[in-house]
Image: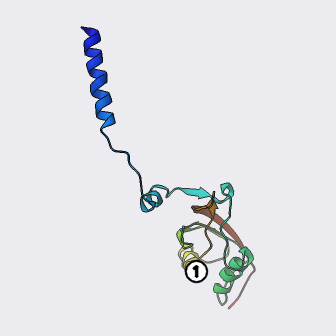
């Protein structure tokens, strides 16, 4: 009797699994699924700012021209999205005399980056930037 019940249970469970259609996600679904943010140190191709990282630092400093600043560092953390835009921009620390919201507003004005990739697949990356600032007076 136990063998019969066991056989019926296995047949029913096997039948229900066999009747489920295979899911084949399209590319849009795959993009939604793979929204993981990768650390920039663990990817194959690093994101690139137009003109290079030194140009990124120079562009930040250019937007600070005319402000009274003290010498120090500006620490930014941000995500470079798959389309090269920046998101989740945070000023982690500022020792130069500008506020976090001011630093974020400057970063939002900059051009798009070339995004990073893993195995030739474009991915979102978490990046940090430490910008050294010299003292400036208005």
The percent position of residue 117, horizontal first and vertical second, equals: 62, 62
Q: Callout 1: helix, strand or loop?
A: helix
Give the percent coordinates (x, y) of residue 133: 73, 77
The crowd level at tag 1 (other Cα within 10 Å; few <14, some 14-19, many 20+) is some
Residue 70 % position (x, y): 71, 79
Q: How is the image coloured?
A: rainbow
Q: Residue furthest top?
A: 1
Name the side, left or right, on which 96 lies relative to 121: right
Judging depth in this view, the residue of 56 and 101 nearest the camera is 56
The quadrant holding residue 95 is bottom right
Which picture quadrant has residue 46? bottom right
Which of 68/85 is in front? 85
Name which quarter of the figure residue 82 lies in.
bottom right
| Residue placed most toward the observer, 39 or 6 | 6
Residue annotated with mark 1: 106
| Residue drawn at x 46%, y 57% as measured from the top left | 30
Q: Residue at x 75, y 80 (%)?
A: 134
6 lies above or below 37: above
Does residue 130 appear to the left or right of 9 in the view shown? right
Query: Foreground residue, 131 or 14?
Result: 14
Q: Establish if 10 lies above or below 58.
A: above
Q: Give x and y (percent) for residue 118.
A: 63, 58
Residue at the location (53% across, 75% down)?
Answer: 101
Rendered-image quadrant of the N terminus: top left
When the figure is inspected, residue 49 is found, relative to residue 42, above or below; the finding is below
- Quadrant of the rendering where the C terminus is positioned: bottom right
């Amino acid at each position: 009797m136990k063998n019969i019940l066991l056989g019926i249970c296995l047949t029913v469970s096997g039948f229900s699994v066999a009747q489920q259609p295979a899911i084949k996600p399209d590319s849009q679904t795959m993009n939604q699924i793979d929204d993981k943010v990768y650390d920039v140190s663990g990817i194959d191709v690093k994101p690139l700012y137009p003109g290079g990282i030194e140009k990124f630092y120079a562009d930040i400093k250019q937007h600070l021209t005319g402000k009274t600043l003290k010498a120090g560092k500006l620490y930014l953390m941000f995500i470079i999205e798959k389309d090269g835009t920046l998101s989740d921009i945070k000023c982690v620390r500022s020792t130069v005399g500008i506020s976090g919201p001011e630093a974020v507003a400057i970063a939002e004005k900059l051009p798009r980056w070339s995004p990073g990739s893993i195995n030739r697949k474009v991915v979102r990356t978490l990046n940090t930037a430490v910008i050294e600032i010299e003292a400036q007076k208005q």
